[in-house]
Amino acid sequence: MEWVEITGRTVEEAMEAALDQLGVDNDDAEFEVLEEPKQGLFGRVRGQARVRARIRPTVPRPKVERRDRRRRNGGNKANQNPTDAPTSVPGPAVEAAAVNDTTDTTDTEGTPSSTGSRPRRRSGKGKPSEQGDSKVSDNDVDLEAHTAIVNEFLIGLVDAFGVDARVETELLDDETAEVRVDGTDLGVLVGPKGNTLNAIQELSRTVVHRRVPGTAAGRVRLDVAGYRQRRRDALERFTRSVADEVRASGVQKALEPMNPADRKVVHDTVNELDGVSTISEGEEPRRRVVIVPA
Amino acid sequence: MSDAVDDTEAEGASGFATAQAVLGYVVRQLVDDPDAVSIELDDRGRRPVLNVHVGPGDMGRVIGKRGRVAQSIRTVVRAAAARDGGDVEVEFLD
């Protein structure tokens, strides 16, 4: 899936958008114009420009490239081509991404071990069942332990706040648990735009990391007073409508960049639908999901 | 909870009981040496400050990478301070 297909009002616009989506410089991309916009009456543009673009595969294809970059410090791959722009370009971009990032992406590039254990959500030809199985058994123990820690942390926190709330946990699937705080007058724990909730989630994650060092954190979700649930519902509805469009038109569509949690909602929603699947592109914090015809 | 309702002279009198409880709780969850954690309220300035002292070596834990943990703590503590009817800064000291 290394090619992305983008439409725009003009070829230039489409190419621009494609670069955005690939997250690379002009020099590192390869284009194919599939369709030029047709000139209509009175010079009006009818139809759209359609281009296909991919990261120039002098070095690796995008997914392989990501692994290579990680090994690059070892210096085994980088030198095969001295004018090798692609390996150098993503580096700074990744660092910048990490600085801006507000969610749980610290493990994206920094620590090889946790990146390796992050579940790959590639639809398509892999062997999902096999991957799934090994993933589940590893994660089960972690997930339970993590959930218990978050649960305990929140009970204490709610108590310190002196709010009247109960904390409950639910295992949503093999890799996700949710800890919910419910009660009255919990706006204080959500905050404007969910700021306080996000901060509490961040602290929960930190506590998990501290208690069980070296494990991949982040699969325990946190919700207060149904705030995330409402947002999730809206995102699911939106995703379904885009998926319908993609299925009907046969043209893939990239969604705007989202944080990992929101991307997961999109992946999960699309996974349940026939005729469409998802891929992720770009680097944090501009990583985004593309819904593609299956 | 009742502290927040007691309007004995707004913030100063309540001493930010909720904010202090939340701050103490969170920080002690994060550090290696919870016994070394102490908090004092400094309300001499224009804006009250909660000074948090942590044991040697625990500073990194409460600050976190690029200050992320510290920022999260501040956000949560200020939410708690709102229940006390005021606003506080949080400073970390070792």
Image: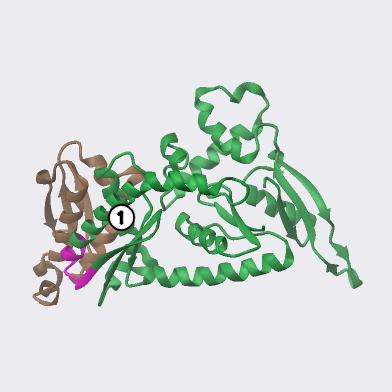
- Residue A213 versus residue A51 in the image, above or below: above
Horizontal relation, residue B94 to residue A88: left or right: left
Vertical placement of B79 versus A135: above or below? below
Q: Nearer the viewer, residue B73 or A69?
A: A69
Q: Is residue B47 visible?
A: no
Looking at the rendered image, the quarter that the C terminus of chain A falls into is bottom right
Indicate the quadrant where residue A157 lies.
Answer: bottom left
Q: Position of residue B23 (x, y in %)?
A: 19, 56
Question: Looking at this rendering, what residue extends furthest in the right direction?
Answer: A41
* Tint applied to chain B in the drawing: brown
Tag 1 residue: B72
Please give left or right for residue B33 compared with residue A126 in the image.
left
Residue A149 position, x and y percent, is 24, 53
In the image, the segment drawn in magenta is A157-166
Q: Is residue B34 left or right of residue A89?
A: left
Q: Check the residue under mark 1 and report the chain it is in.
A: B
Q: Position of residue A270 (x, y in %)?
A: 57, 62
Q: Residue at x 54, y 51 (%)?
A: A287
Identified at 63% across, 40% down, the residue is: A62
Residues A188 and B15: in front is A188
| Residue A225 drawn in magenta | no
